Amino acid sequence: MSSSTTDVPNIPEPIAIFKLAGRYLLYDVDTITCLRAKHNVMGVLTGQLPQAPQQNVFSGIPLELMPEEARLLCEKGVGYVVDDVKAHKQGFLDRGLSEEERKVFRETLRRQGQAAACRVEEKAMDKKKAALSKAGGNVGDWNDLPEDMLRPTSRASGKKGKKKGRSGTTTPPESIGGDPLDAAGSNINEHAANGDLDESESLFAQPSQVNTPPRRVPPAAQSTGPPLPTFHVTPTTSYPPLTAATPPPRSSTGSPSTPALELNDLGDPLDASVSELPEVPPSYPLFKHMHSRGYFQAPGIRFGCQYMAYPGDPLRFHSHFLCNGMDWDQEFDLLDLVGGGRLGTGVKKGYLIGGVEKKDGLDSTDEAESNGEGVRTFCVEWGGM
């Protein structure tokens, strides 16, 4: 049922699950990939994409976990919950950063901003060169003037050809050193002295333009300009400069789902950022029971249920069941059962309800509920539709 793990990154366990405003978040892409491939936990992406901020079809990190998913990972020893607010207060205020650490962190952000500004500038220059090459052939350094723009126009050359045919003499556009700029300037000066240029052509033969040929800008002068702006980078992670909270040790005698936190003299945890196990709804035993059978589970708000159960990765499979967890003696309306059964059949899924079974009139123990043991499920499908 699980997906292939050939290209799954190797993430050291347990991983930190950050609790913020009652939500359980993950910020690392490799961690998200590992949990999905190895532990059948996928969560819901809630972050906005910087490249397309005005849409809500595709989302990015952070990934939000359901309380049931966070609790399951903690009980399996794969993760532990860190109170994000307390971790930041403890890291920045209680422990504090030295001046050297602050300086190194600011310098790192400044270099990231300069690198981002250089990449943006390079992309802009590439777009300019691509547009110029598409419009007029290959362009090397687009600040240099092409040589054909410095030569006489075709109109002037045509008239000179006529006069040259009458006189029978020709003046080759050559000069000492073979510089075409000097050749063009000497040619224009010669015709201007003989009175061969008309009024329109004399506009190009002003003394300031003829005697002083255009001077090309050297490459060294082109490169010296105002410094590139530095983008202000907002850090996407606090580690570094903060150090990750130490995972709590597990009790060797008690249940593996109970963390043995180290306490101080006042009875408070030594690491205040490490939280207890997440609180879960009464449907958690059904969630854990389905997970132990290899199902991927996602929130079922779209179909009016608690969970949607997939037999494999949702990128490859459709969901098979609409799941609702109940207590064994819980009363429910028959209309809910009819509505859920008809809805599930209409969307080609089964409507599944389940809970921890009571036997011989004894109440189910908390350990059985937390471990997902003794759960019975019933699937409802509507016939004749």
Image: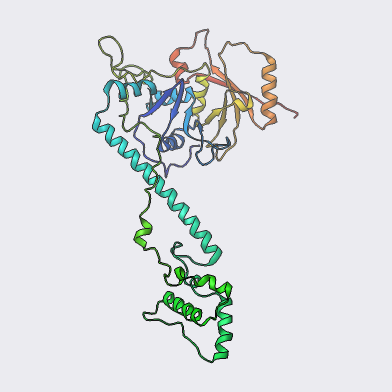
Query: As drawn, which residue projects farthest toward the right?
Result: 384
> For this rendering, which residue is in front, 363 or 204?
204
266 lies above or below 189: above
Q: Quadrant of the C terminus?
A: top right
Q: x, y percentage for residue 82?
A: 37, 23
Q: x, y percentage for residue 119?
A: 42, 49
The quadrant in which residue 344 appears is top right
Q: Residue placed at 43% from the left, 68% from the top?
A: 214
The quadrant in which residue 264 appears is top left
Q: Residue placed at 34% from the left, 16% from the top?
A: 254
Give the tally of numbered discs: 0
Q: How is the image coloured?
A: rainbow
Q: x, y percentage for residue 176?
A: 37, 81
Query: As drawn, which residue projects farthest toward the top?
Result: 361
121 lies above or below 222: above
> For this rendering, which residue is in front, 210 or 220?
210
Q: Residue placed at 47% from the left, 52% from the top?
A: 124
252 lies above or below 198: above
The quadrant in which residue 177 appears is bottom left
> For this rendering, which residue is in front, 212 or 252?
212
Is residue 163 visible in the rendered image? The answer is yes
> For this rendering, which residue is in front, 146 or 301?
146
Q: x, y percentage for residue 185?
A: 45, 76
Relative to 379, 117 lies left or right: left
Is residue 249 visible in the rendered image? The answer is no
Query: As drawn, which residue projects farthest toward the bottom?
Result: 168
Relative to 165, 193 lies left or right: left
